[in-house]
Image (cartoon, grey):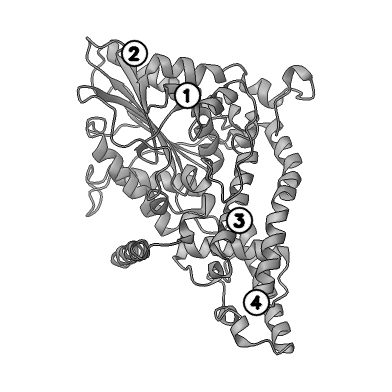
Amino acid sequence: MATKTVWIVLCCLFVIAQADQGGFDVRHHLSTVTRYSVSKDVTQNLIEGSNVPSECTPIHLNLVARHGTRSPTKKRLRELENLAGRLKELLRDAEARNLPSDKIPGWLGRWVSPWQGKVKGGELISQGEDELYQLGIRVRERFPTLFEEDYHPDVYTIRATQIPRASASAVAFGMGLFSEKGGLGPGRNRAFAVTSENRASDTKLRFFECCQNYKSYRKAKEPAVDKLKEPVLNKITASVAKRHDLSFTKQDISSLWFLCKQEASLLNVTNQSCELFTPSEVALLEWADDLEVFILKGYGNSLNYKMGVPLLEDVLHSMEEAIKAREENLPQGSYEKARLRFAHAETIVPFSCLLGLFLDASEFEKIQKEKPLELPPQPPKTRDFKGSTMAPFGANNMLVLYSCPAASSPKYFVQVLHNELPIAVPGCDGKDFCPLEDFKAKVVTPHLKHAFHNLCNANLDDPKHKHPSI
């Protein structure tokens, strides 16, 4: 535990030191591989301060969170093995050509994959555990009246997908949330339940795996996405190859960019693979990653987020149940106060899109009519849709239900927080805090036109069921 704490402190000091130096920091440009603590340094579409009146009281919390920082997956480990072989080939070729040593990055000759020898991957790493553990502590401190009850699984419902890194994230969060609330060990921890639904039928947290039409769409669209990204990779491959006089291929550059993201996010190493790329090249590579997220998970097609409606309905249902319990004056400890969910980027991105986050008013009107949006513009133009702020490791959306004084009309309000900060919601007139009835009418109801089964299993070749595509 002491070693882990020292490691975390050193990482934090490193981040602070880099920030003090100013200038470009590649760790802010890693799309969905961005670390949570780094993402929180970047404010986007967020609202300064809170608009919640002091007399209003939180009565229920919905949390939808992505798992914390994880190791590379098994497939990606194989890619890094292949990259190691390719780098050796490039070095042999450079030596055969007597290439000047100043052309070859110093780290290249001594690079060994930090994951060499691993055969399994994708697990939550200690850094990811700490992200969720600290989030649990902060949530309890922020909403003390919601978490003053003794733990009961029906009062604090914790759900995760069946993927181990999601359930491990739920456990880490729960350990923080309920720390010093029990009698287990020196930390006075307590046991708590994390429930999961079968991944083949989990339409609330793994809807992307249960929706056959989405799986077909994604499979058909992936080659087109690769084609859109190809000019960026070709351009950067030519530039990096020319700078170092090494015969990098497009696949080499793709793998080296992946390595850069892993080294920078997981290991805080930014002076090796990341230094192959200039800041403008990093910006283009980040855009290409975001483009893929936009088309295959986000606003690029209404199916991407409409299939998440069962989750949105579950959120609304939990709010209505909390109101019913309050109206009926049920005793404390007899009704749910928080519904806490842990899943994936493929969950958090569509859910954020259902809420209309990171859109302006005109774009929000388009998605309400199921019209596709323009693709995110290439740098140097700015864009709102960024994986680094929308869905970094540990990303979360919280919807907090508030009860305001009886004299207030309306009585119930919803506040939307993204990564723990108030965020503008176009359906709430650009505010983070709006009447529940407005939230239902303007944000939720327009998405309820299609049942999940019809959306995901109907024949979309039938014009009656056709959904827009970019």
Circles 4 and 3, Cβ within 8 Å, touching? The answer is no
The earlier-in-sequence mark between 3 and 1 is 3
- Pointer 1: what residue? 314
Query: Which mark identifies residue 285?
Result: 3
The earlier-in-sequence mark between 4 and 3 is 4
Query: Which mark identifies residue 244?
Result: 4
Residues packed near mark 2 inside 10 Å, few (<14), some (14 to 19) or many (20 plus): few
Q: Is residue 62 depicted above or below 75 in this figure?
A: above
In this rendering, position of residue 108 left or right of residue 212: left
- Pointer 2: what residue? 324
* Residue 365, picture quadrant: top right
Q: Amino acid at mark 3?
A: Leu
Of the two numbered discs 4 and 1 in the rendering, the one whose residue sits closer to the viewer? 4
User: 292 and 431: which one is in front?
Assistant: 431
Is the C terminus in the top left, top right, bottom left or bottom right quadrant?
top right
In this rendering, position of residue 387 left or right of residue 241: left
Q: Amino acid at mark 4?
A: His
Q: CA distance from mark 3 to mark 1?
A: 36 Å
Of the two numbered discs 2 and 3 in the rendering, the one whose residue sits closer to the viewer? 3
